[in-house]
């Protein structure tokens, strides 16, 4: 469970993962160095400095209390000012404690107060919260309260905050350099991934400059070679299909003409039906083999496309109704989507008496549900129905036409757009085929 939660928290993208791999160890190392320095050097140094100041203050008090006269105090004050760098004055009537500039001082103040209490063995008041270069101390002595002002650089080590600042500055600089470097390395990968996604949807991303590491450049070159081979294969297949279509349709046209000139008979009607079935089968084979690569994607409103497909099914006698919801605009190959949706509607109409088509937009996806009231198929056979030339006549016995390519073509069209076609149980009791298309396909 803990491993799963950590996996959910960690970034998913290559850019942020790489940045985390580089920046996190560096930041942790800097943090450890800082903590070690503060505990082992800065605090220890500040403690020794505070003890030295406490010893000097104790010495000044001892020198004065041996002969507490005005002349003696002037001598001691001069000695404290130079070389001890302490400013002293006597307050004969004031209270020991005074108002502080701020309620709380830094935690390091405890070093000096502890050292003074150990050296002087008397009460004292200490304040380092006021602005300026000095800290204040008030210590009871013979004849009043001794005011002592000591320079901060005598009490606290100034190298600690500077060291911390340098550490954080170096870490920030490392992170900035890492962001720039990693971004320049990840951008070519993102560009390659985008080009591959475009090409997979049938779009031509064109050539772009080689950038990034040697391995990324090699992958880009391999993609360019693969793209060129696939385009050459598609062009050759298109030429082959054009030749096959011409060679097969010419004799079919001659047969249709000959049948039209022959006297009517039952055998002739059967031959015409066989010829029509042959022509329909040929059209379905060619549609499956041709694919959708010859059509360029464009922004279209799928609402009229759905209406046109439904109207075509109604004209041949199917009971089909349609509902639309939301904006159905998307970047698609309209002809291919029309062919896929027509296959789904024809498939539903051939197996059921009633067909319901519902098109709606769900976020960034357009879904088109095609429901029928036919016998349906077992969920275990859903994927088998998408196999080319698959015929599930044992479960959907009303299907007497086609060669089993309708669902295969529909799914091929949907996946070429980055979507899919899935089957499920229909609310009408039969089968539901859902065509999903991303808006930005």
Image: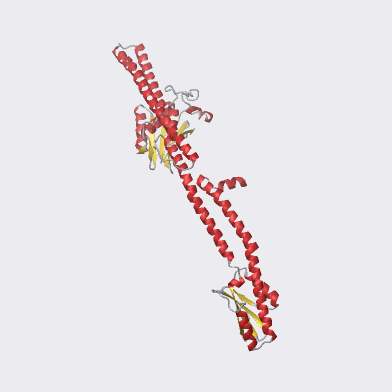
For this view, does 273 lie left or right of residue 183?
Answer: left
Question: Which quadrant does the C terminus fall into?
Answer: top left
Nearest the eye: 407 or 203: 203
Residue 94 visible, this angle: no
User: Along the horizontal axis of the image, is 212 left or right of 123?
Assistant: left
As drawn, 112 above or below 354: below
Looking at the image, residue 61 lies above or below residue 256: below
Q: How many marks?
A: 0
The outermost residue toward the left is: 261
| x then y, percent, for residue 270 | 37, 14
Question: Which one is in front, 210 or 391?
Answer: 210
* Residue, far front: 83
Q: Is residue 28 visible?
A: yes
- State the image coordinates of residue 296 (x, y, percent, origin top left): 36, 35
Q: Quadrant of the N terminus?
A: top right
| Residue 67: quarter of image | bottom right
Q: Is residue 214 above or below residue 386?
A: below
> Looking at the image, which is closer to me, 205 or 358?
205
Front residue (pair 324, 344): 344
> Residue 28 in the image: x percent, y percent?
59, 54
Tell me the colour scheme of the image: secondary structure
Quadrant in which residue 110 is drawn: bottom right
Residue at 34%, 17% in the rendered image: 252
Residue 440, position in %: x, y? 41, 41
């Amino acid at each position: 469970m803990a491993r799963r939660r950590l996996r959910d928290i960690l970034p998913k993208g290559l850019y942020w993962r790489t940045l985390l791999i580089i920046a996190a160890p560096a930041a942790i190392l800097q943090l450890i160095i800082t903590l070690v320095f503060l505990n082992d050097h800065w605090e220890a140094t500040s403690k020794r400095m505070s003890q030295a100041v406490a010893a000097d203050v104790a010495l000044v008090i001892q020198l004065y209390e041996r002969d507490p006269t005005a002349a003696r105090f002037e001598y001691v004050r001069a000695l404290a000012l130079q070389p001890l760098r302490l400013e002293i004055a006597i307050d004969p009537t004031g209270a020991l404690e005074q108002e502080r500039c701020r309620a709380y001082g830094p935690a390091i103040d405890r070093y000096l107060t502890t050292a003074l209490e150990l050296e002087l063995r008397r009460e004292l008041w200490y304040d380092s919260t006021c602005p300026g270069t000095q800290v204040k101390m008030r210590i009871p002595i013979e004849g009043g309260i001794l005011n002592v002002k000591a320079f901060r650089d005598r009490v606290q080590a100034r190298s600690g905050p500077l060291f911390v600042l340098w550490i954080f500055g170096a870490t920030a600089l490392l992170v900035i350099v890492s962001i720039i470097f990693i971004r320049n390395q990840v951008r070519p990968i993102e560009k390659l991934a985008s080009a591959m996604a475009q090409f997979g949807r049938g779009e031509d991303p064109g050539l772009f400059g080689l950038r990034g590491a040697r391995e990324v450049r090699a992958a880009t070159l391999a993609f360019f070679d693969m793209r060129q081979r696939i385009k050459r294969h598609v062009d050759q297949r298109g030429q082959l299909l054009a030749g096959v279509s011409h060679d097969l349709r010419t004799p079919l046209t001659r047969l249709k003409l000959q049948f039209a000139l022959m006297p009517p008979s039952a055998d002739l009607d059967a031959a015409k039906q066989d010829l029509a079935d042959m022509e329909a089968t040929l059209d379905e084979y060619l549609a499956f083999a041709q694919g959708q690569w010859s059509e360029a994607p464009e922004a279209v409103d799928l609402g009229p496309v759905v209406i046109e497909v439904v109207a075509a099914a109604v004209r041949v006698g199917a009971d089909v109704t349609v509902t639309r919801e939301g904006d159905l605009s998307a970047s698609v190959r309209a002809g291919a989507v029309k062919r896929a949706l027509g296959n789904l509607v024809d498939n539903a109409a051939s197996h059921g008496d009633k067909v319901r088509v519902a098109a709606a937009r769900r976020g960034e996806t357009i879904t088109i549900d095609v429901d029928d009231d036919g016998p349906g198929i077992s969920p275990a056979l859903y994927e088998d129905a998408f196999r080319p030339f698959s015929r599930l006549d044992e479960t959907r016995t009303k299907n007497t036409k086609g060669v089993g390519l309708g669902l295969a073509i529909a799914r091929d069209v949907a996946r070429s757009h980055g979507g899919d076609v899935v089957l499920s149980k229909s609310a009408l009791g039969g089968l539901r085929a859902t065509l999903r298309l991303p808006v930005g396909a």
